[in-house]
Amino acid sequence: MSFTTWLQEWLTRHPLREPSEGERARYTAEVMARVRTFEPSVAAQSAWIRQWLAWPRLTLALATTAACVALIVGPIHQRRLAQRVVRDAAVLASLGEATAEPLVIDDEESLREALEELDALVVAEASSVDDSQWIAQTLELLGQLEEWPRLWRGDLDPSSGAEEWIDELELLDESDLNT
Amino acid sequence: MPDESGIIRAVLDGQPDRYAELVDRYQGRAIRLAFSLLGNDDDARETSQEAFLKAYRSLGRFRGEAAFSTWLFRIVINECRSRWRRRAREPLATARIGGSPAADEESEGSLFVDPEDPGAGPAEQLAQRELARRLSQEIARLPMQQRIAFVSHRLHGCSLEETAAIMRCRVGTVKSHLFRATERLRQALGPWLIQEQHA
């Protein structure tokens, strides 16, 4: 026989003790005597409170939800900004440009400032791309468009300097614009 | 027997005396539940009365989603918890943490169950009385959540679902508390179980 079965059997032979009938009447009388000390409408008041609280409850729930969303989204946004700073700093480092001072980012405002500073550096760095690289990219593009500069027509010496190439390409741009 | 929701409506509509019908209907179970949790007649009586008064004051907030008895028993349990915490803060000399004072343990005031067994002989009556006392003590020693689950389901016959509603937890949690409580009692009452089986 399992313990649970034994216990159930034992409890059927030994039921929980009951208050006697006399005690029941006295108990009810005691409770009701205390109930009568309340205002007659005290029970109904709680119903009114529940109705009145219905719309503030909704407002409170919406406000709490909004606050929770802000608490969750805020740090995520800040983390993304921080990741961007790190990435941009890495780009700069690969180009041989390092930030003058170590970045101190302790709030969103300083994070934005750091980002703007880095953006300016990256833009400045982008404009100083090597001319030969720019020429190669442009030639590739022209090749795709079947626009062949004088190099392929034999008008320009391959050993010409970068300046001549740039002039040639700018001329091409102008002729494109005119046509 | 008048409909429960009808009585509640009447009380809310300005007939507070109708509340006596609810008190009369549920006082037995409320007292027994409080007694099983507190292990003391006076405390059980006082705590269950407090619960009835709190239920009356909050009657307008009762939504009728569960039975009135479930709602009331939840209040009884909360009151018992409060009293239990207050006891725990009392000085050790007067504290009766988790059970009854030593003096009460010897009297029948601390027994949850009726120790009398009309069909038993004098020796067995004595053994049954001792077992009833020991069972009451061991139930009183259970951690609060285990005790609530055990008392509500095993002693008061509430279904698992009703016990879960009273405890405001999932049925699985109730089952877990029940399992642990039963294991503790089995270990504590093992010797008596063996005696019973041999008797």
Image: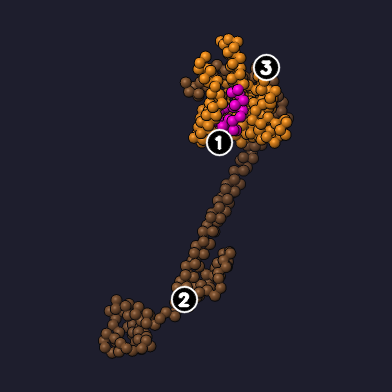
Mark 2–mark 3 CB contact (< 8 Å): no
Q: Which is closer to the viewer, label 2 or label 3?
A: 2
**Does A67 sit above or below residue B101?**
below
Describe the element under mark 3 as helix, strand or loop: helix
Q: Quadrant of the N terminus of chain B?
A: top right
Magenta range is B134-151
Q: Is residue B132 left or right of residue A118?
A: right
**Does B192 sit above or below residue A57?**
above
Q: Could you confirm whether marks 1 and 3 are on the same chain? A: no
Task: Say what amino acid the circle numbered 3 marks.
Answer: Gly
> Which label number is shown at residue A96?
2
Q: Which is closer to the viewer, label 1 or label 2?
A: 2
Q: Give the residue at x 58% y 50%.
A: A64
> Which label number is shown at residue A22?
3
Choose between B183 and A46: the one closer to the eye: B183
Task: Say what amino acid the circle numbered 2 marks.
Answer: Gly
Q: Give the residue at x 57% y 53%.
A: A67
Choose between A101 and A171: the one closer to the eye: A101
Q: Is tag 2's residue or tag 3's residue first in the polypeptide sequence? A: 3
Q: Is residue B93 visible?
A: yes
Q: Is residue A100 left or right of residue A145?
A: right
Q: Colour of chain A?
A: brown
**Circle 3 residues within 10 Å: few <14, some 14–19, many ≥20:** few
> Which label number is shown at residue A70?
none
Q: Is residue B113 visible?
A: no
Residue B66 drawn at (x, y percent): 55, 32
**Circle 2 residues within 10 Å: few <14, some 14–19, many ≥20:** few
